[in-house]
Amino acid sequence: TTEPDNVELTVEGEAAPADGKNYQLPKSGNPYSYTAKAFGYEGTEGTFSISGDEEQDKLTVRLQKQQTYQVTIPYEKESDGPAGTVKLDVKSDDYPNAVIKAENQEDNVFALPKGTYTYKVVCPGYKTVSGSFSVEDTELTLEKAVLKIQISWDGETLDEPTKEDGTY
């Protein structure tokens, strides 16, 4: 088992099992090596041996939380634009599948460990704003992203604008 549950666990020499956590390993492969990592936690590695006793062979891998830093990503919509809900996505370069949510949705404040990140601010009717940043040993406030009214289709947004005379 792992703590937290979302740990990426790899046992050397063995294909990952269907559920990502349970392995059936022969004693002849002793000792086994493993690596464990998860977004926001210190990764770890180690070894273990199989004795053949189901209870004795259970292993729990516990990862320690990394220190986080407050990152604020401010934005504003250009005035007189359409109403719409702004969506702010942040992705870790090292953990692209990690779901990263703001601590405070209204202030766009994130608690992030050291690392490199990309962000994207999207709102229907506005041009998408994106960029990247790195978190070091301090809090960070990014430059305010200004969402400009979109008068032509950027080829990315799902809400295709109306065509006028055959053009966007």
Image (cartoon, helix red, strand yellow):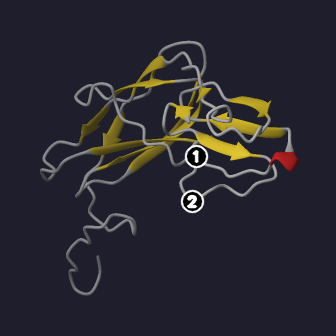
**Residue most extreme to the top:** 138
Q: Secondary structure at mark 2?
A: loop
Sort mark 2 into few (<14), some (14-19) or many (20+) by Cα contacts within 10 Å: few
Describe residue 52's horizontal placement relative to residue 89 as left or right. right
According to the image, label 1 marks what residue?
21
Depth order, front residue of 108/160 = 108
Depth order, front residue of 89/35 = 35
According to the image, label 2 marks what residue?
18
Q: What amino acid does circle 2 point to?
A: Ala
The image quadrant of residue 135 is top right
Q: Residue shown at 86%/41% (left/top)?
A: 30
Q: Is residue 120 above or below residue 158?
A: above
Q: Residue shown at 57%/59% (left/top)?
A: 18
Q: How many labels were placed on the picture?
A: 2
x, y (%) of residue 13?
82, 52
Sort mark 1 into few (<14), some (14-19) or many (20+) by Cα contacts within 10 Å: some
The N terminus is located in which quarter?
Answer: top right
x, y (%) of residue 130?
45, 46
The C terminus is located in which quarter?
Answer: bottom left
Q: Is residue 55 above or below residue 29?
A: above
Q: Secondary structure at mark 1?
A: loop
Q: What amino acid does circle 1 point to?
A: Lys
Q: CA distance from mark 2 to mark 1?
A: 8 Å
The image quadrant of residue 111 is top left
**Residue most extreme to the front:** 53
Residue 89 visible, this angle: yes
**Residue 12: image tag:** none
Depth order, front residue of 18/4 = 18
Depth order, front residue of 4/93 = 4
Describe residue 168's horizontal placement relative to residue 3 as left or right. left
